[in-house]
Amino acid sequence: MEMDDMWIPFIALLPLKRFYGPSWSLLSMLPSNIMFSHLTHLELHDSIDSEDTNALIAFLASLPALTHLAFDDLNASSLCSSLLNTCKSLCVLVILLSVVIQRFYGDHTQDAVLVQDSRFVCIRCDNYLHDWLMGARWGLDYWHRAELVIAKRRAREIDPLQIDLLEDQSLDIVLA
């Protein structure tokens, strides 16, 4: 067991609602593990190896409560169409960016299809720690901002093809 794997036994019996970690750590466990039975929010922070793509999609599709999925790797966008088609319970699929947003309106056919799915959003998050604290304390994190973008797209308050927040709005939230 590698040092990075040592944490797995400690959390494997917890019915987590949110998990942030690398995809390889998930693929070493069974989706039926109690840890995943209540998991609604999942953020994967590593690059997905191409040989793991199908296994990861199948794994994520088998998570019964998963409604929110995020990647902080722009290259994960190649998985997103398959995930949205396969993971029927997904309500929010986020690509997290901490640099200037690169739009998906390019020449790629897959990207053109992807931006038409209202569940797909790109969120800029320059200060992850602040965003996490805002989420832990008040529920005002990038997940919340993604849900707002999706709701506005569906209500036609913004362009239905707008998939991103061009500014990190987490720092604009001030609570009295």
Image (cartoon, grey):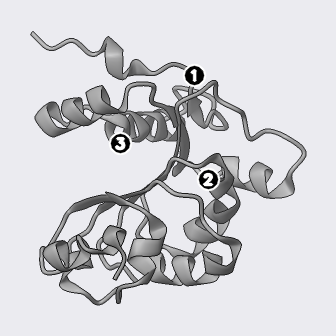
Q: Is residue 96 above or below residue 9?
A: above
Whichever of callouts 3 and 2 sits on the residue coming sooner in the sequence is 2
Which residue: 52% across, 84% down?
58
| Residue 117 numbered tag | 2
**Separation of residues labelled 2 and 1 (CA atoms):** 19 Å
Amino acid type indicated by mark 3? Trp
Name, please, the residue furthest toward the right.
Answer: 107
Whichever of callouts 1 and 3 sits on the residue coming sooner in the sequence is 3
157 vs 161, nearest the viewer: 161
| Residue 143 numbered tag | 3
**Separation of residues labelled 3 and 2 (CA atoms):** 17 Å
Which residue: 51% across, 19% down?
167
Specify whether 172 is left or right of 93. Answer: left
Residue position for label 1: 166
Q: Is label 1 in contact with label 3 (beta carbons under 8 Å)? A: no
Amino acid type indicated by mark 2? Asp
118 vs 1, nearest the viewer: 1
